[in-house]
Amino acid sequence: MGQRLGIAAALLGDPGVLLFDEPVNGLDPEGVKWVRETCRRLAGEGRTVFISSHLMSEMAQTADHLLVIGRGRILTAGPVDDVIASATTDRVRVASPQATQLAELMASRNLAARPVAPNVLETTATTAATIGELAAQGGIVLHELTTIHASLEEAYMTLTSDSVEYRADPTSQNQVQQAVQQAVPRASARG
């Protein structure tokens, strides 16, 4: 309800430019859909609608163009699909009871593939169509052949990797634990 009232208040005076900060936080799915449709409708009327959000999947569904900022600098800008493509690579997942033979056939064509599960390979070296054709030529049975498109979240993580202050990796977690351990004795010495 608060976000809807905030949007309504922002529309008073019929502005040409709107700025919404995290407009879908805390909303139920119906509210998220309403905000998304409202922002698209407003943009369709010729208004400029800026949305600041950490919800990448929501931005991928809502935005036409993105502006990614890291440490106060513009890292990239452009249509959603272009931003994703500029920072990531699609991969092809193929499942086959003859995965080893398929990997050998691909290697003979200088196409690298890596096993990700029993009888499942992934590659970024070629397209699903090429793998399907190679498999057919080699008489290899396929159970799955899927192009996996990278997400906006993956692109965002790649684009901002040099711009983040805090990381969710084991190294930074160890640093946090060390800082806490160093702070605890100081706090108890004061108390």
Image: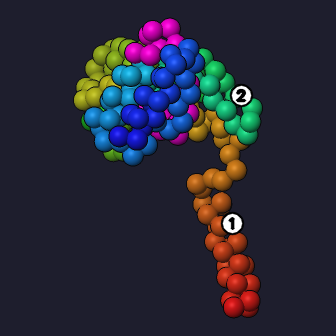
Q: Residue at x 67, y 79 (%)?
A: 181
Tell me the CA gap for discs 2 and 1: 29 Å
Q: Label 2 sits on what residue type?
A: Ile
Residue carrying label 2: 74
Report the residue at 28% width, 28% height from top: 144
Closer-to-camera residue (162/67)? 67
* Residue 118: percent from left, percent from top: 33, 45
Give the residue pinned by disc 1: 175
Choose the circle earlier in sequence order: 2 or 1: 2
Residue 171 falls inside the magenta stretch: no
Q: Secondary structure at mark 2?
A: strand
In the figure, 131 relative to 46: above or below? below
**On screen, residue 141 above or below 99:** above
Q: Residue furthest front?
A: 13
Indicate which label's residue lies in the foreground, 2 or 1.
Answer: 2
Residue range corresponding to the magenta coloring: 41-58
